[in-house]
Image (cartoon, helix red, strand yellow):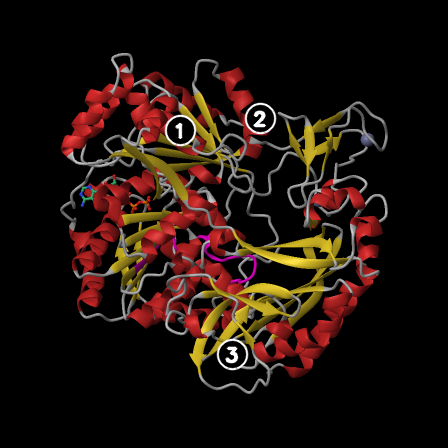
Amino acid sequence: MIAKVIVDVPASNVNRTFDYLVPEELKDTVKPGMRVAVPFGPRKLQGFVIELGEETSVQKLKKIIELLDPVPVLTEELLKLGKWVSDQTLCFLITAYQAMIPAALKASYQKEFRLVDGVGLADLPDGAREWFKHREYIPMEDLLKMSPTPLALFQKLVQKNSLEVIYRMSDKITKKKIKIVQRRGTEEERLQHIESLSKQAVKQKEILSFLHESESPVVLKDLLEMFDTTRSTVQALESKGFIEIAEKEIYRDPYGGREFKRTQPLLLTSQQEQSIQPVLAALEEKRHETILLHGVTGSGKTEIYLQSIDRAIQMGQEAIVLVPEISLTPQMVNRFKGRFGSRVAVLHSALSAGEKYDEWRKIQRKEVSVVVGARSAVFAPFENLGLIIIDEEHESSYKQEENPRYHARDVAVQRGEHHQCPVILGSATPSLESYARAQKGVYTLCELSDRVNKRELPSVSVVDMREELRAGNRSMFSGELFDKINDRLKRGEQSVLFLNRRGYSSFILCRDCGYVGECPHCDISLTYHKKQHLLKCHYCGHQEPMPSQCPMCESQYIRFFGTGTQKVEEELAKLLPHARVIRMDVDTTGRKGSHEKLLNQFGEGKADILLGTQMIAKGLDFPKVTLVGVLAADTMLHLPDFRASEKTFQLLTQVSGRAGRHELSGEVVVQTYTVGHYSIDLASGHDYHSFYETEMQIRREHKYPPYYYLTLISFSHTELLKAVDASEKSASYLQQKVSPGTIILGPVVSPIARIKDRYRYQVMIKYKNEPRLSDLISELLQHFQHEMDGNGLQISVDMNAQNIM
Ligand SMILES: Nc1ncnc2c1ncn2[C@@H]1O[C@H](COP(=O)(O)OP(=O)(O)OP(=O)(O)O)[C@@H](O)[C@H]1O
Ligand SMILES: [Zn+2]
Ligand SMILES: [Zn+2]
């Protein structure tokens, strides 16, 4: 039997299957979709079995070394889907498959040195000999940890044939085990054991009597706690042969020990009722249909999701729910666990690799029927999918910004077609792409124009911050916002203050000469971190101490600028010393569980003001929040990105949506320096439809998506001229080959001109229909293959660019 295997090397010359012989003893067990270890050149690599057969054109076949899975980790459907992802995004097959499985299943390879047979310690020079005195294998890592590293010496010895390099492959999987204790023998024997213990052994006696009564095993740790004793007591019983201590594998449950209050389906409003109909119909008829659910904030979209899932489960099917990483809050998880209990698995990046692996196995073993997760959960290995839901479908985080550069929305629709099941895209501010498709009839459009129980959307007032400045107000709070926060404090209600992080980092600036602290490796200003009194680069991690005087002119007047959340917090403390403030940003939510803790505190009324970045814009539903303040609405508007207006509109709508969701009505204050911009004005009027019309016109004029598709090719090199050269050659090559309607823009320098010492150039391709595009780009890549392999050129291709920075 022959296995066709994709091996774990992301390179173009290996981007195909290789044939291996299946050893006799594995013939009955090996299946497509399983991982295997195979010899590949001098190495042992992990690979995926794609297909089994009898024929091969290879003369001397190598054998599969080992089967790594008892059951396939990729289903037949996922194997096909991986091929599709690779075709669509122009990534290597192995990269697509790796993206579908949990990180714990990816192999790690270690380079190790060992003595060549026949070479003895005495043959080695000083500096190498000591290493091998007690060890046979020396991992390269260990050498690199030494300074200076003896690596060069080791490499010389490899050339001299004294040492050889081997590659060790290991799984990252760990299964968590706990110790359990159980009784032994018949009832009569156990009673004898208890009798036989001496009077002094009180604890032993108690424990043995307890175990005698208990039918199921007890967790050792619990037992010790219960009887307030140490391990030796139990070990004594074990060595007498009275009890047994065993190991048991358990799931790491990130939500373990937590109670989820069970909820019942709510009686749907008539708008909800209308919107759920197409979903239920498609479910019933086992038919694929993509439904765009456009519902204003607080219109009860989540309840529609829940009841649709319920129906799918009743039909014996499974459901995937995607939510943006940032709104995968405990509040969100509670809503699903509350309705479906332990039938829900949760997958998001805050889980450890082990926890993710355990949640994934619950899906694989069919122990759950719903998964709630971020982008990559779209690959959940369900085999009987009945429904896929993408909440906040406009979110840019659904597009992966590294290989494979897939969009979860496209993958969801692809899987929906395969399983003949409905896909729901939900949002208060659908992406222009999706709304346009709904307009064309490609998607079914359902709209929820009212909040549940006809609660009013909050009233929004836009404040011109330039006016404030002219009137002598230098603080970051307008008079109106300040008064309203104060009101809330007096009334015992809560406020949410939102500060957009993007485009608003706190950089340092010399007031005398205008010097700005920049990263020496990237063309971007350094961000000041107050706690450590350091300047950091957010692209490459470079850090340096905050200078006490200007490095250019030696002036003392060097300060940090920009309004970070820390600065807002400080100003609040000055202006409203009694207000209790919770700040949520990357700095305060770094530790595991801190996100949840802060939100709980706010929910329990332990603070008056929640101050935060993007991470508070979505999904929050707190009854006492009656004021939302947006400190600077226009920070994102000026980014060099054609989606800047759309993103601003979406963000403002989402943040405003946090106010007045329950009995108390809400107000929103939006501060801006760009008064009169349509995306701010229309967001404050809650007018999605006008925004859609306005923005579509602009996109048509400038030939941007959704009228045109957009592919971005980026070139980078440590030598400026090489990056320029590759991008120029590519642009002129494409120019000659593309069809007449297609537009090639560039090459131009990328908006961030240098990252990690690499110069960056880009070429943009705008097209309506370019069937040969993938082929053309593949030709380009082939042409530059040599330079990419050896000369440090990097070319990355984004077939459906969302981010053009
Ligand atoms: N049919 C219903 N009857 C009563 N209350 C409901 C009903 N449907 C939803 N709700 C409640 O209305 C509130 C808002 O609903 P939900 O959070 O689902 O809205 P949403 O559209 O998902 O909002 P957002 O887009 O802002 O996250 C919730 O507190 C929810 O429990
Ligand atoms: Zn200066
Ligand atoms: Zn940098």
| Residue at (22, 67) in percent of width and height | 282
User: Magenta segment, principal secondary structure?
Assistant: loop
The answer to which of marks 3 and 2 sits earlier in the sequence is: 2
Task: Write down the residue under mark 1.
Answer: 597
Q: Nearer the viewer, mark 1 or mark 2?
A: 1
The image shows residue 273 at horizontal and vertical percentages of 17, 55
Horizontal placement of 330 versus 805: left or right? left
Kind of residue indicated by mark 1: Lys
For residue 157, above or below residue 773: above
Secondary-structure class at tag 2: helix
- In what quadrant does ligand 2 lie? top right
The answer to which of marks 3 and 1 sits earlier in the sequence is: 1
For residue 198, above or below residue 465: above
Horizontal placement of 571 versus 340: left or right? right
How far is mark 3 from mark 1, CA to CA?
50 Å
Question: Which stretch appears magenta?
Answer: 388-405
Task: Tell me if residue 70 is in the magenta stretch.
Answer: no
Q: Are marks 3 and 1 in contact (CB under 8 Å)?
A: no
Q: Please say whether residue 760 is visible from this viewpoint.
A: yes
The image shows residue 776 at horizontal and vertical percentages of 62, 79
Kind of residue indicated by mark 3: Asn
Instruction: Give whichever of 162, 92 is nearer the camera.
Output: 162
CA neighbours of label 1 inside 10 A, class few (<14), some (14 to 19), many (20+): few
Task: Write down the residue under mark 2.
Answer: 567
Task: Tell me if residue 397 is in the magenta stretch.
Answer: yes
Badge number at residue 528: none
